[in-house]
Structures are given as C-alpha cells and as structure tokens.
Amino acid sequence: MRKFVFALLVMALLVIAAGCESPETNVKTEKSLTIGDVTVHYSGDVSLSQAKAVLGFVRDNFQINGKTDVYVSKSGDSYTVKVTTPYGSADEIDKKTAFYVKIMASKMSQDVLNGAKLTLKLLNGDGKEVFSAESKYAYIESNGITVWYAGVSEDDAQKVLDYAVSLVGSGPWDIFIDGSNPYTVSAMSSFGSKDEIGDAEGTYRKMVSDLSERLGGKVVLRVLSPDGDEIASFTS
C-alpha cells in the first residue's frame, strides 16, 4: 500500500534569486519587509500582518537559496503574489513543479489570506512572469492525508477524508474533489502509467464504490501520476 499513496506536498518549490529587479507591472509597491533572505514588497492595501504571513509561507513551502523577492498586491477582494525564481522561461518548468505551484496557490489562499482569490506568479531574474496559477481549492487534512475540494461542501470533503484515513491509516496522500454531478475524485499516486498500477486496481475499484455510497452519488475516480497527469479512471 505504500506505493499506492503519494504526497504532493512533500515536494518543495525551488526558489533561487540574486538581486532580481522589480517586476514590470503596474502594481505600486509602497512598503517592504525583509526577514533573512526573503524580502516582501507590498502595496498599501496589504497589511503588515499579511505581508509577514506571505513571507513565512514562502520560507516554509519554497526552498530558499539566495536573496528572494516577493511582491504582494491587492485588487478588490483578490490578491496577487509574485515570487522571483531561477527559472528563465516557462520551458524550464517541469510538470511536477507546475502542478505543485497550482496547489500552492490554493494553500497560500487558505493559510494566509482567509480563502481569498489568489494568483501566484513565478518571475524570472528580469522580473518577468514565467508561470501563473490561480487558487481553486480549500482543504482539510488529518493523519498526513489532505483532501482538496472545490464545488462541494466541507461536509462532503470530510466524508472523503474520513474514508481515506480508514483505508490507509495515514499519509502522505493528497486527494482532490471537483464538483458533485458526478463527484470527480482525483487521487495522487506514485505510479507513472496505468501499467504500473497492478494489484492496486482492486483497491481503486473498491474505493470508487465505497465513496459513491458515502457521498450518495456517482463518483469518477481519477488516478494521478506524480506530475498530476491522469493515468487511469474508474466510475461507480
């Protein structure tokens, strides 16, 4: 079963920057805060406490190696966070990193900004955008298992989390739920292709059946590779 479960968030995004210039945007940064190698530049409608929280999040979830600049701005109820990185262009960002950044946008939104809409952008050394992702999911977690959910209630997410804990005991493991007609449940795995699933197929088939019963509706279970690609699907 160890090969069956896989945690997305054991990976950390590498951030290395050396004196990057301010990004070429129309956002006016009015204040800055530096702790260690990380400097957060933030606009007037972003509070100091939010700036500190963003800085802490970047330090905890990104691998910092060198001076790193973070830019935080707000427009209406939405936030934009830009982080300088060693990536020169989008071509240098592999699938696993891209998938991780997408989830980090949601995690930062919930952990730092009370679930507000957030766009997380990676910048190159010239301050130009090389990758962008918007927050999508809320999440709950227990025993190293995280359930990310969008378009369903927290109660439904809790049912999936309780089931996952009963199935495997503890993580690391990440599961995603999108919508309820049908419920689309995506489970991370360490498998690179459908051919590698082998005996675990029986577990996945049981899982889709059990989840359908617990959620009271049709379930499509998608098995994801470490890159976030679908490699197999099962329907209740």
Image (tube, grey):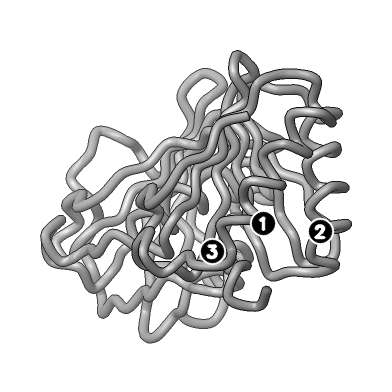
Amino acid at circle 2: Leu
Residue linked to disc 2: 167
Q: Which residue is more in the foreground, 25 or 59?
A: 59
Task: Kindly tell me whether residue 77 is visible in this rendering.
Answer: yes
Q: Is residue 111 above or below residue 193?
A: above
**Secondary structure at numbered mark 2:** helix
Quarter residue 153 falls in = top right
Task: Name the front one of labels 1 and 3.
Answer: 1
- Circle 1 crowding by C-alpha within 10 Å: few under 14, some 14–19, many from 20: few
Amino acid at circle 1: Thr
Q: Earlier in the sequence, mark 1 or mark 3?
A: 3
Q: Earlier in the sequence, mark 2 or mark 3?
A: 3
- Circle 3 crowding by C-alpha within 10 Å: few under 14, some 14–19, many from 20: many
Asked if marks 2 and 1 touch (Cβ < 8 Å), the reply is yes
Could you give the CA–CA distance between mark 2 and mark 3, rounded to whole angstroms? 18 Å
Q: Residue 176 appears at what percent x and percent y?
A: 60, 42
Q: Which residue is more in the foreground, 68 or 139?
A: 139
